[in-house]
């Protein structure tokens, strides 16, 4: 036996004990943890099972690595991180204290100093700040706790060459949030196709130290976002609960069901039902109703049941309202027609409907197509002198 080789049996017996302790764990996992090839360990175990005559020798280093593997080193579905995880709260509270007492430090700087990813640190901070349980690698927790104690804190550094002034990004994000409801920082980041934690960290770092920059690519993508898709929607401060309820009932009156309206507005039918009963909206309901209204208000829906139900409740259709009156609780419906039904036209009514559609950006041909009128018939009506204003009975 060479002086640098030893009997493999103590090491294989130790590994067999690990396997007996965790029978569902692949041998390859133990091999990787010991830093040897899985095929080597499988061969050693196979020879050991054939009896003493087949026993082999291994290098002293290999035996030492196998014997050093402990049960707690191995992955466990309830513990994660190879069995070496720990409660993140103490380390993350220490990080929060450092960020508060040293304004020049950023999450990214501390993440680099502790040799962990910024995403991991930001997500763990978010969970701990919210009071949610969080575990991280014990080694990472130890490195975070060492910052400012055994490990010097990073010095204030000049802006990196791959960053730009974050103020423009901060202003742009705030502008979007003023223009849109349901425009969280995370949603803006997702729309810009950047990591939400990265954008959130950059905004927080900028608040602490305006000299901090933001990655050029992140800034470029965020600044390129000028419109947000649903479920965000343009903030309309004049919209009232009364107007939302009238819009919801109006869509039902022309054949749209609550599930269809909810799907178009990225919410649930139950949320709309609760709103219809209580008359009190949430941002999600507000966005859902306004989004669906823009899509469904001017075309008939497929549900005869929704129309019958709305008629039984005497709900007014969309064209019973003007945009300037629908949100005023003191107004009454003008009432014109339900889309898709025959209508006896007069010049006043036609002008009223053309003005309604024009305010929504439709061209004259599109208006006439929606109203089911030919150009010649519309011209004939519009050349007549306007009749005195009359109240058109609502077709519910």
Image: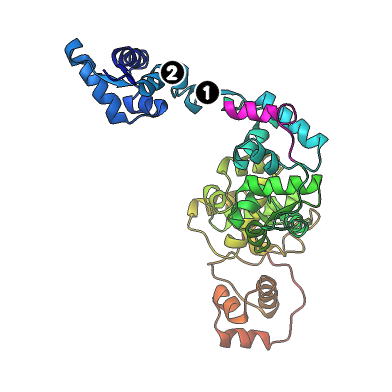
**Quadrant of the rendered image containing residue 18:** top left
Residue 188 lies, in percent from the top left, at 65, 53
Of circles 1 and 2, the one toward us is 2
In this rendering, is residue 116 above or below 331?
Answer: above
Q: Dot 2 surroundings within 10 Å: few (below 14), some, or many (20 or more)?
A: some
Q: Which of the two residues, 255 or 120, is positioned nearer the viewer here? A: 120
Query: Do callouts 1 and 2 mark residues in contact (Cβ within 8 Å)?
Result: no
Name the N-terminal-most of marks 1 and 2: 2
Q: Residue at x 33, y 17 (%)?
A: 23
Residue 331 lies, in percent from the top left, at 78, 58
Q: How far apart are marks 1 and 2 (CA)?
A: 15 Å
Magenta region includes residue 150: yes
Magenta region includes residue 116: no
From which residue to which does the magenta span run? 139-154
Image quadrant holding the N terminus, namely top left
Q: Mark 2 points at which residue?
A: 68
Q: Which residue is drawn at 53% across and 50% down?
A: 263
Q: Residue 84 carries which label?
A: 1
Q: Which of the two residues, 11 or 26, is positioned nearer the viewer here? A: 11
Residue 254 lies, in percent from the top left, at 56, 59
């Amino acid at each position: 036996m060479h002086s640098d080789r030893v009997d493999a049996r103590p090491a294989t017996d130790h590994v067999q004990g690990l396997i007996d302790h965790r029978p569902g764990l692949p041998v390859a996992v133990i091999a990787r943890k010991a830093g040897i090839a899985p095929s080597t360990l499988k061969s050693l175990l196979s020879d050991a099972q054939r009896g003493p005559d087949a026993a082999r020798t291994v290098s002293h280093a290999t035996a030492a690595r196998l014997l050093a593997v402990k049960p707690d080193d191995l992955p466990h579905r309830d513990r994660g991180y190879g069995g070496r995880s720990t409660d993140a709260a103490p380390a993350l509270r220490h990080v929060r204290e450092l960020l508060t007492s040293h304004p020049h430090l950023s999450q990214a700087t501390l993440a680099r100093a502790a040799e962990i990813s910024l995403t991991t640190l930001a997500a763990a901070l978010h969970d701990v700040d919210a009071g949610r349980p969080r575990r991280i690698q014990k080694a990472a927790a130890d490195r975070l706790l060492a910052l400012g104690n055994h490990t010097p804190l990073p010095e204030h550094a000049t802006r990196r060459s791959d960053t730009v002034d974050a103020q423009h990004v901060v202003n742009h994000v705030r502008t979007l949030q003023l223009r849109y409801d349901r425009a969280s920082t995370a949603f803006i980041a997702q729309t810009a196709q950047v990591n939400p934690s990265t954008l959130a960290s950059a905004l927080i770092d900028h608040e602490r130290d305006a000299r901090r920059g933001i990655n050029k690519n992140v800034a470029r993508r965020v600044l390129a976002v000028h419109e947000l898709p649903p479920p965000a929607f343009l903030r309309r401060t004049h919209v009232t609960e009364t107007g939302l309820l009238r819009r919801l009932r109006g869509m039902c009156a022309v054949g749209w069901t609550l599930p269809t309206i909810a799907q178009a507005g990225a919410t649930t039918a139950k949320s709309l039902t609760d709103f219809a009963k209580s008359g009190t909206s949430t941002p999600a309901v507000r966005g859902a109703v306004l989004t669906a209204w823009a899509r469904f208000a001017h075309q008939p829906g497929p549900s005869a049941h929704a129309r019958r139900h709305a008629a039984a409740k005497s709900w007014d259709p969309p064209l019973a309202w003007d945009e300037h009156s629908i949100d005023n609780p003191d107004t009454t419906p003008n009432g014109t027609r339900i889309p898709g039904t025959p209508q006896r036209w007069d010049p006043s009514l036609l002008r009223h409907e053309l003005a309604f559609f024009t305010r929504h950006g439709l061209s004259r041909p599109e208006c006439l197509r929606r109203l089911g009128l030919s150009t010649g018939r519309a011209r004939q009506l519009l050349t007549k002198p306007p009749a005195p204003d009359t109240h058109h009975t609502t077709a519910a």
